[in-house]
Amino acid sequence: MSPEILEALNDQIRMELSSGYVYLAMSAQFESESYDGFAHWMRLQAQEELEHAMKLFDYVNRRGGRVILQPIPGPPKEYGSPLDAFRNALEHEQAVTASIHRLFTLAVELDDVATQRELDWFVTEQVEEEENANRAVDLLARAGNDVTALLFLDKEFGSRTDEHDHGAE
């Protein structure tokens, strides 16, 4: 594995861990506001991001590289309304997608076919991540300030059970 790929993979591991931290912060805010369903959805999303980081962590190790964990920036303390938080989540997922695409492009440029194949899964996963966040934004935008609609969506988002079941989606 080239030093450039190793550095980029370590950067992506940091980004995935940071994503988990962001989603956990959103979960904490929702929990404090008694939006238990949104909190649950975000907590599962945080766990999923940690799984993504570990998938890359394991890949680097299988390839004989060394994972160097980097500092994770603190997430914002407030995300506003549920709609604002999910808009933030969508923007965050778009940034992760761009990072994965840059990493994939680097793997192509360096003819690292093994890393390209590993990243295929992440490219597909990011399509799903953006789709889920975008759908959540759409639903919350339709709900607007209607308390009944927000509480209904909160309950629906609380039905999420794992990384392949994103509730209300």
Image: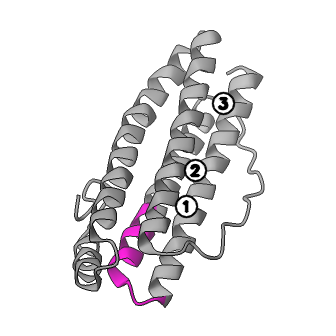
Q: Amino acid at mark 2?
A: Glu
**Circle 1/circle 2 CB separation < 8 Å:** yes
Which residue carries the number 3 mark?
A: 64
Q: Amino acid at mark 3?
A: Gly
Q: Position of residue 123 (x, y in %)?
A: 43, 32
From what the image shows, is residue 102 above or below residue 138? above
Dot 3 surroundings within 10 Å: few (below 14), some, or many (20 or more)? few
Q: CA distance from mark 3 to mark 2?
A: 21 Å
Q: Quadrant of residue 111?
A: top right
Residue drawn at 45 percent across, 22 percent down = 117
The residue where tag 2 is placed is 16
In-front residue for pair 46/167: 167
Find numbered disc 2 in the image and state the secondary structure of the residue it sits on.
helix
Regarding mark 3 in the picture, which secondary structure is present there?
A: loop
Q: Secondary structure at mark 1?
A: helix
- Report whether residue 47 is seen: no
Q: Position of residue 104 (x, y in %)?
A: 55, 23
- Segment tinted magenta in the rendering: 33-45
Q: Magenta span has 36?
A: yes
Label 2 crowding class (10 Å Cα cut-off): few <14, some 14-19, many 20+? many
Does any portion of residue 166 appear in the rendered image?
Answer: yes
Q: CA distance from mark 1 to mark 2?
A: 6 Å
Looking at the rendered structure, the kind of residue marked 1 is Gly
